[in-house]
Amino acid sequence: MMTRLFPFWAVLVSALALLRPGPFLTLVPVITPLLAFVMFTMGVSLTPADFGRILRRPAPVLAGVGLHYLVMPLAAWGIAHLLSMPPALATGMVLVGCVSSGTASNVMIYLSRGDVALSVSISAFSTLFGIVATPLLVRFYVSSGIAVDSWALFRSILTMVALPVLAGVILNTLCHRVVRRVEPALPFVAMISILLIIGAIVAGMGPSLKEAGPIMLLAVILHNGIGLLGGYWGGRLLGFDETVCRTLALEVGMQNSGLAATLGRLYFSPLAALPGAVFSIWHNVSGSILASLWASRPIVRKDPPC
């Protein structure tokens, strides 16, 4: 129940961080370890069999990852230019568009009667693919006037994403019984970690957030909406059934925005972390609303293409 209220807690923590930034600013040095811990909790929920599904059912997995890395970076770049965003915010938007799918998408897909097993497979493959794709896409889409250290981005994604996820998978494989006992608490612990990351980032850019707030929120809503629509109708055009289309919508539209915010702060500027922080809040709000609407609608099934 607590994790389902994530959008409310995210808004509340953001408001507290703006009003009383002091306590949250003390968390800034641990943003990177917190994000690595979130990715570790994701890894703990995975097994080698989850990755094996990619080989047994490659078409929807490849469609999800392909749509994700085609739609979201291009949409971020286009929106940033359409709204004439400052270079730092435009860079942050591109970062949001170029990271892997969000860790909360699996929960939203479960609530929306989507295909949870497919969601896990797409999330896993998207995360692995993003180790290489994210630095390359950021370099391609970010303005030529801004220096992009692709190798440093790659190293950070490797240490903050790949290694923690791998460690989680290994722990789940070797100590599965122990993991099963603590697994129910992991989503709550991950949620608290993400909230602390959001609070620390928002506290560090209070004045900038107040100044750029309206245009930033508009950009994030447009970006997230394009991702949700692109995933759903992309699935429709490819001939997948309703369950798969709902899954693709949320996997494409929900980003690992905590990673984007952390990378923006580490390698560009505090302002470049702002789109990731705002996206972290909004995509959980929109995802919850969409999941609630879909949960009340019957699934219209259609056989997927061969």
Image (spheres, rainbow, N blue to C red):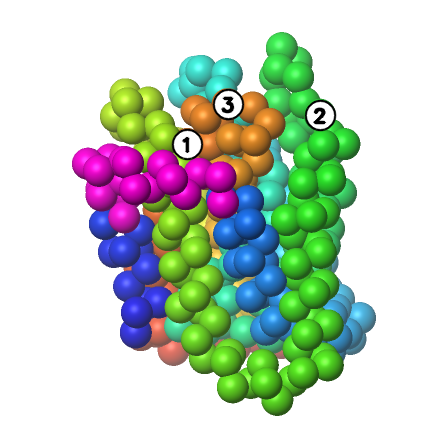
Q: Which residue is mark 3?
A: 269
In the figure, is residue 21 to the left or right of 278? left
> Secondary structure beneath disc 2?
loop
Distance from Cα at disc 2 to Cα at disc 3: 13 Å
**Helix, strand or loop: magenta stretch:** helix
Distance from Cα at disc 1 to Cα at disc 3: 9 Å
In the figure, is residue 288 to the left or right of 197? left
Q: Does residue 273 appear in this view? A: yes
Per the rendered image, the range of residues in magenta is 13-30
Looking at the figure, which quarter contains the N terminus?
bottom left
The picture places residue 207, in percent across and down from the top left corner, at 28, 23
Indicate the amino acid at tag 2.
Answer: Asp
Q: Which residue is mark 2?
A: 149
Reply above or below: 271 against 185.
Answer: above
Distance from Cα at disc 1 to Cα at disc 2: 20 Å
Q: Residues within 10 Å of mark 3 (few under 14, many from 20)?
A: some
Reply above or below: 299 against 29.
Answer: below
Q: Nearer the viewer, residue 257 or 60?
A: 257
Q: Residues within 10 Å of mark 1 (few under 14, many from 20)?
A: many
Name the residue at 56% across, 66% down: 41
Indicate the amino acid at tag 1.
Answer: Leu
Q: Does residue 257 appear in this view? A: no
Q: As drawn, which residue projects farthest toward the bottom?
A: 177
Give me the disc on residue 274: 1
Q: As drawn, which residue projects farthest toward the top?
A: 145
The picture places residue 115, in percent across and down from the top left corner, at 54, 73
> Secondary structure beneath disc 1?
helix
> Secondary structure beneath disc 3?
loop
Q: As drawn, which residue projects farthest toward the left?
A: 19
Indicate the amino acid at tag 3.
Answer: Ser
Residue 166: quadrant of the picture:
bottom right
Looking at the figure, which quarter contains the C terminus?
bottom right
